Image (tube, rainbow, N blue to C red):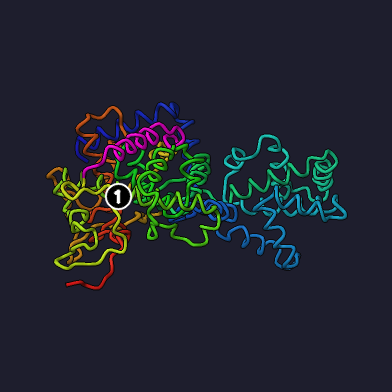
Amino acid sequence: MNEENIKDDIRYLQLLAQSYPTIAEASTEIINLQAILNLPKPTEHFISDPHGESDAFNHVLRNASGYVKRKVEEIFADTLSKSAKKELCALIYYPEQKLQLIKSKQQNINKFYKTTLENLILVCREVSSKYTRSKIRKELPKAFGYIIEELLHESDSGYGQKKERYYEVIIQSIIDTRRADDFIIEICRLIQRLAIDCLHLLGDIFDRGDGAHLIMDTLCNYHHFDIVWGNHDINWFGALAGNRACICNVLRITLRYGNLATLEEGYGINLLPLATFALETYGDDPCERFQIANPTKRLNFDDKTLRLMTLMHKAITIIQMKEEAAIIDRHPDYGMDDRKLLHLMDESRQSIRIAGKDYELLDHRWPTVRPENPYELTTEEEHVMEQMVRSFKTSDKLHRHIDCLLAHGCMYAIANSNLMYHGSVPLNEDGTLKEVKIKGKGYKGIDLMKKTGYLVREALNPNAEKADRDFARDYIWYLWCGPDSPLFDKDKNDDLRTLFCWKRGSLC
């Protein structure tokens, strides 16, 4: 062992000594940890790409992707009917709602309470069997902690029938004091909590669905989780950092999927400046190519709202093209000139030339695109963007949610000796790790993941040097859609090409 390793070991032991200053305390902790290592492995849960679907996300957490159902099947295989087991599972998943339904139909409510309480104790005992008593004690609800602990360890007493009456009285007293509903709700929540020891979320919380803010509310209060950032999450990071292209992307995707609730109700983003501008600029434009992507979602809005969202969708799309062009011009090393399309339209706005071929445009009304300088924002567009930047950067709830993702996440994670990442690891054609240049320095593999993760944090660090923060803020957009981004890693992004809506047949 070399001298440097010895010094590191000494520093590590000195830190440990602060927590365990005596041999007795250190020995006790060693015994405890060794015992824990030989317990059955707690359940870890992996979820990817919830994309704002909060109801589905929360349902998966409540049932632990079928783990609770499997335990109920194992415990009551021959003692409960199929329908009774199904009812018990539903009660565990949604105790408040299910109790109301049951009580409205149940004839003998006391008998239901007694049977249900006994069954729930059996399920809770089973899902808690992988943990130490100390850990379980920390998770017990304050109001019923002592009672649940006694009931969970009923079989450990060793006194058989001598103590059976004791447990029967506990359950009957819960019913007699009219605390059965509260007790059932708390023990169902405890079962949900113990069913998943750790949640691993593999990216893309945001966009498409309209409940990303609700998912984040759940996560920020969750007992134990980590996250690998996805490109859609990075897009929102950039929006909070003030990256105007990312803000446009967030707005465009939200409008495309009809998710105004996330912006307005979730994060308090003021869409009035964009709505006013869209009405004034595109009020007589049918904007047929910019309607909500999901026809079913259109049923949630009246005709006036749908019309306004369509106009706003087109307005922000054109602004996005201009804002992205500004980043591309600032960073020619990104190699993303093919994403700049506005200058390829002819003066009549009827066609666009791509790779030497002319294509007919299906939408050719672009009143804010000036042929002499197609990427310059109009005065009105600049005003809209200033307002949007201010609204995103001052959203307290968005700040809290992104802070939570920064505290619990990064570009990659390792769990159970498995490498987890959201997009890909850039490779050369021969399968070797591809070197990606950032500020002239090459990074690949884990070094690339670490560097890009550092840049994300730097973009959101108010104490960073302005030049470094500006560079990092631009790079967040590259992580969203750049060809060598570990979160994207494709040759090109066709989202804006599709919105341009040209016919595929050549006019040449």
Residue in the foreground of this view, choosing between 8 and 419: 419
Which residue is painted at 49% across and 43% down in the image?
213
Q: Is residue 125 visible?
A: no
The quarter of the picture where the C terminus appears is bottom left
Q: Is residue 337 visible?
A: yes
Describe the element under mark 1 as helix, strand or loop: helix
Amino acid found under the numbered disc labelled 1: Ile
Does 219 sit above or below residue 106?
Answer: above
SS assignment for the magenta stretch, majority: helix
Residue in the foreground of this view, choosing between 195 and 427: 427
Left or right: residue 505 versus residue 15 is: left
Residue in the foreground of this view, choosing between 248 and 17: 248
Q: Which residue is mark 1?
A: 318
Magenta run includes residue 389? yes
Residue 69 appears in which quarter of the rendering? bottom right
- The tally of labels here is 1
Does 292 sit above or below residue 197?
Answer: below
Magenta segment range? 376-400
Looking at this rendering, what residue extends furthest in the right direction?
Answer: 108
Residue 120 % position (x, y) = 71, 52
Which residue is painted at 43% across and 26% down in the image?
21
Left or right: residue 433 versus residue 101 is: left
